[in-house]
């Protein structure tokens, strides 16, 4: 409608992002189904090699297109070709989920740092933000099913308290660990430890 067809590069970029979003919606349905499947411990992972820098870039582009509020992404992957073995759909979901939470639980704008690096024969993936933070008395409950942190004056945050439960479920299923550090008013950092 706006002459986008005349600019092949821009058209292809938007079509690619639209395709990614459709896949994301599909994976959200998959995520809901997984909840009931996981109750029976029948979830099967399909492991593939995933380039972390590419995955972070794709997520960045999707969320910037959404444009809910001003978002600054800082991506730091060392080495840049760092890869992991993971289920592409489920791992993509947990990164998207953590980014979405960083956006939801922030004020008028947010800076999100996506990083990955090797340390002590392990791969560390970090999703950090400068949002509103999580109260210390909630940190040990955030991965519980249906648990939601009270958001005070933020009334437009919707959800069922399944997102971080799903994240922990998938991290556990891969045999990894996840840790969270947070300071109210300063931000939150989730770290996934692989290996």
Image (cartoon, rainbow, N blue to C red):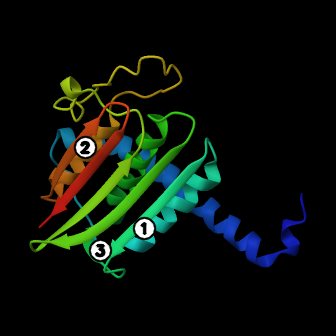
Q: How many marks?
A: 3
Q: In the figure, residue 140 lies in which quadrant?
A: top left
Q: Which residue was labeled with disc 2?
A: 37
Residue at image position (22%, 56%) is: 192
Residue at image position (27%, 25%) is: 147
Where residue 59 appears, x then y in whole percent? 49, 60
Q: Earlier in the sequence, mark 2 or mark 1?
A: 2
Looking at the image, residue 167 lies above or below residue 126: above
Q: Secondary structure at mark 2?
A: helix
Q: Which residue was labeled with disc 1?
A: 55
Q: Quadrant of the C terminus?
A: bottom left
| Viewer-nearest of discs 3 and 2 | 3
Q: In the figure, residue 32 lies in which quadrant?
A: top left
Looking at the image, residue 83 lies above or below residue 57: below
Q: Which residue was labeled with disc 3?
A: 48
Q: In the figure, residue 18 lies in which quadrant?
A: bottom right
Left or right side of 112 for 135: left
State how far apart marks 3 and 2 are (Cα).
Answer: 21 Å
Check the image and name the residue furthest to the front.
186
Q: Is residue 103 visible?
A: yes
Residue at image position (56%, 49%) is: 71
Q: Which mark is residue 104?
A: none
């Amino acid at each position: 409608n706006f002459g986008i067809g005349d600019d092949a590069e821009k058209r292809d970029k938007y079509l690619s992002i639209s395709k990614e979003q459709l896949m994301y919606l599909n994976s959200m349905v998959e995520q809901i189904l997984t909840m009931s499947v996981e109750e029976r411990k029948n979830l099967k992972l399909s492991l593939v090699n995933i380039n972390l820098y590419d995955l972070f870039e794709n997520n960045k582009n999707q969320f910037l297109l959404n444009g809910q509020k001003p978002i600054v992404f800082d991506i730091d992957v060392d080495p840049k070709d760092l890869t992991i073995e993971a289920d592409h759909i489920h791992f993509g979901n947990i990164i998207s989920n953590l980014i979405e939470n960083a956006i939801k639980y922030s004020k008028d704008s947010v800076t999100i740092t996506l990083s990955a690096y090797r340390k002590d024969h392990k791969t560390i993936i970090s999703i950090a933000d400068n949002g509103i933070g999580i109260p210390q008395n909630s940190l040990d409950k955030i991965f519980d099913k249906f648990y939601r942190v009270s958001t005070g004056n933020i009334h437009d945050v919707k959800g069922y308290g399944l997102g971080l439960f799903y994240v922990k479920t998938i991290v556990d299923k891969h045999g990894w660990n996840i840790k969270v550090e947070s300071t109210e008013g300063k931000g939150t950092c989730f770290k996934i430890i692989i290996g």
